[in-house]
Amino acid sequence: MRLIKVLVTCSAILVLLAVSANAAKVQVPEGTNISVKFPASIKISSGEMSEGIPLLFELATPVEIGGKVIVAKGATGTAVVKESVKAKKGGKPGKITIEFVELAPSEPWKAVDGSNIKLKGSVTAEGKGKKTLSYLFIFGLFIKGGQGEIPSGQIFTATVAESVILQDTE
C-alpha cells in the first residue's frame, strides 16, 4: 500500500514537471515601446486633476513577442498624475504631467512572479499663457492662463521599465 502511494506521488510530480516544462515562456525586454491612449470618457486637465490621482489608459496596438500577442489591443494599464499646476491669474498657464506605471498582460499570459509589466515614460501638457493680454488691459491681472490638457484619443508612447518573463498559463 505504501509503495502505491509513493508511485502515485512520483507520477503526479512527473506530470506537473512535464506540464510546466511545456508551458511557453516569453520575455518582454526592457526598452520595448508600446502605444497607449487615454479613453475619450476621461478629461485630463490641470484644472480638474490633482497629484497622485490614478488614471486608466488603453493599449492602442497589441504587444507582440515572437508573433504571439502578449497584450491585446484595448487592454488597460495604470498611469498617475505626477504634477498638476492650475492656471493662475495674471495669465499664468496650467501644467499637467502624467506618468505611466504598469500594464497587465492579457490572458492566458501571466508574469512568472505574478506582477504586471512595469512601465516608464510620461506625458506633459502646458496651457496657453495670456500674460501679454493681461498687461494690455487694466483688469488683466484677473485674466487666467489656459489649463494644461492632455487630449484623449491621441496615441502616446510608454516604455517597458524592466524585463519581465511571461508564461502561457493554458
Image: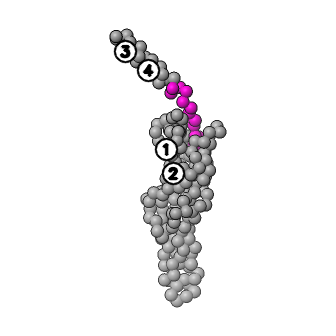
For the residues bearing labels 1 and 3, Cβ distance under 8 angstroms:
no
Q: Residue furthest left?
A: 1
Q: Position of residue 68 (x, y in %)?
A: 62, 39
Neighbours of disc 4 within 10 Å: few (<14), some (14-19), many (20+) = few
Residue situated in front as seen by the camera: 49 or 124? 49
Q: CA distance from mark 2 to mark 1?
A: 9 Å
Residue situated in front as seen by the camera: 66 or 97? 66
Region of the chain picked out in magenta, as a range: 19-31
Mark 2, residue position: 77
Mark 3, residue position: 5
In front: label 1 or label 3? 3
Q: Earlier in the sequence, mark 1 or mark 3?
A: 3
For the residues bearing labels 3 and 2, Cβ distance under 8 angstroms:
no
Q: Is residue 54 left or right of residue 161?
A: left
Whether residue 128 is visible to the viewer of this picture, yes or no, is yes
Q: Which quadrant of the figure has residue 146?
A: bottom right
Q: Residue furthest bottom?
A: 138
Residue found 49% across the figure and 68% down from its top: 46
Q: CA distance from mark 3 to mark 2?
A: 47 Å
